[in-house]
Image (tube, grey):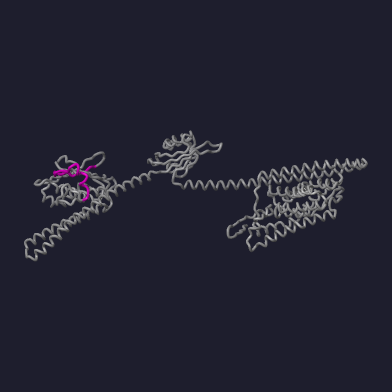
Amino acid sequence: MRHRNSNETNHTVSVQAPLGELSTLSINDLLRVPADSRWRTAVVLSFWFLSLLVSVGTGIVVIDSELSAIPFNFLGFDAHVTIYPPLIFCTVLLFWMGFLWAFVPAYFATFILAIYSNMPAGWAVLFAFSDTVGLAFLAIAYRSTGIGFDLRNIATIGFYVLASFIAALAGASGSFIWSHTQNLTTVETLAVWEGWWLGGFLQSVLICGPILFLLTPAVSRLKFRWFGVAIRHHRGALMLTAATLMAVFLLCAFALGNAYLSRLRIGSQLAEGFSAAQIAAFADSAVVNLAWVSVLLIIASGLGFLGLTARWNKELGREVRVRTRLLEQARKRVSAIINMVPHMIFARDAAGDFVFANRATARVLGQSESELTHTGSQSLPDVSERLEKLAEEDKKVFSETAVDQESVEILKNAAGEERKLRVSRQLLEQDEANSPAVLTVAVDITEQEQAEARLTALVSDLADKNLELERFTYTVSHDLKSPIITIRGFAKEMARQIGAGNTEELRQDLARIDKASARMQKLLDGLLVLSRSGKLSGPKQRVNMNRLVDEVIEIMQGQIADSGATIKVADELPDASGDPVRLFELVQNLVENAIKFTATGTAPDVIIGCEQFEAENRYFIEDNGPGVDPDDRERIFGLFEQVEQTDKGTGIGLSLARRILQVHGGTIWVEQGRELSGARFVFVLPPAGPSQKG
């Protein structure tokens, strides 16, 4: 059952405690009610103020009506009883509203009663605490045990009777101050003392008990509905100790006080001339009274403490189960969180045995979590060997030479791959039953470093491309502008010649315009081919290089025949892996380059072959041309770069060759010819895999 009180600034939720458990109605509870329900606060305060007035008034009535120490005989036993209504009201206030609500009327009623009886003010201030001591014991007893006061079962009834008896003894302590200030005799003192504790006990059991039994459920529900105050109080060891010590003290005071007053009464009767038979009868009566009360007190105390112990054990067992369940839930939550982390998290003791390991650790090491945590390190030789480097760093933590440390280490995973880890360690203190362990968190940074390397390479490639783009923009604007200027100039000249009728010069100018436009077309075609060279036309496959070279030579047969070139191809060129279309463009550009750039009057001579160097296939195309100066061997692969500015080329061919090889993961360079006197262009392509099909 839940109840919510709210206002504009806060919200309070209270959960109802077991019926009849002691709970205090505080001033804050009264002030926290909504504005439209403030009448509830007025009702409670009016009820309390009325109880205060009735307590004071009935206390005065007790004095005027001489209701103190009334003698009576019960089954042959002589006793005295005092009727004191204020104690009834204050006991009910204690259980329904709290100790402070009961303390004020109890104190003021007793204080006014004392002043009304002509007790000195100093003694009256002290005397007024007598009833409040008994109420304090009841409050401590119920707050410390948590037992309900609804009196619905034998346990609550027994505890209420026992607590009421001890509280009555505590409240009767004021009888001695009363007897002293009223100059009572010893016999009168005994009667007053007996009347006070017996009257208080009987009132509590016979009057307050039925009231609590009948009205407590309704009052508890009303408090909770109006104010939401039915909160279980914490019962600490200090409160239990205080209640026990007060109970023991009051029991001892009762026994000693009864015996002491009995001796005083016997002495007074001897002084007053009573006969031996009368004195013996009085002594027997006192001993019997003391014996019966003591026996009843011992039985009640025993039953009460047995019940209390059983209740404490039950509550303790329940609390242990609740805490165990919460701890297990917390453990499962932490375990689930740790297992969701993709990084290795584990702890190992000084012997190298795993204390715990998460799922990522088990996956990397190729073991199950159970195998890691329930199998000694000696039984996992493969794991121990792979963790040997990590174990060396663990020793530094155990020796406290590196309490908290971070390092980068290499670890082979279950597949035998070397992984780079960023490892953090910390000494994990454990309880006395377990030795310390090193908590390790290892983050796999292999992909991160590879990504960083790729990013660095991409940035470098981007910088190169930006530089190439800058050169491209400049060259295009220069090389394309020249034909346009030529065309425009000769167009103007043609207009003039047409007007003059000079047809011969007109034909020459048209020829120059055709040559300039052809040059422009050639440049644009080269740029178009270059733009496509950065992309593969299809998936990579196994390429037969001898067949590809034969196709290139067949396509270029007309150009070869016109130049009188001789091309020699090695018999066994190894297959390569790549895009056949782009590799065809690569070989064609290099062969065209070898044929075009030869000495004047010399027939081109070209050799196509391959050399193997450290598992690398190095294809080459060598010519008998003038060669390339070492200072120009890198520059000629730039866009529109030529050793000599001629009309034989556009400066795009070698840039195209390098771009194609970059896409294939290969490279190209130029060196001095070996068999011929010219240049040798060497390029490397990835070898064809056994699974690739041509």
Q: How many marks?
A: 0
- Residue 29 position, x and y percent, is 65, 56
Q: Position of residue 508 (x, y in %)?
A: 9, 59
Taking the magenta stretch, the answer to whether it contains residue 249 is no
Expressed as whole percent of the image width and height from the top left, the position of residue 516 reads 14, 57
* Magenta-tinted stretch: 617-639
> In the picture, residue 6 is in which quadrant?
bottom right
Q: Residue at x 38, y 43 (%)?
A: 446
- In this view, the residue farthest toward the bottom is 499
- Judged left or right of residue 229, residue 413 is left
Q: Quadrant of residue 670?
A: top left
Q: Does residue 161 appear in the picture of this structure? A: no
Of residues 672 and 59, the one nearer the viewer is: 59
Along the horizontal axis of the image, is 285 left or right of 639? right
Residue 261 placed where, x, y %? 84, 42
Q: Answer with left or right where residue 554 lies relative to residue 279.
A: left
| Residue that extends furthest to the top in the rendered view of this protein | 399
Q: Nearer the viewer, residue 399 or 98?
A: 98
Please identify the quadrant where the N terminus is shown.
bottom right
Viewer can see residue 486: yes
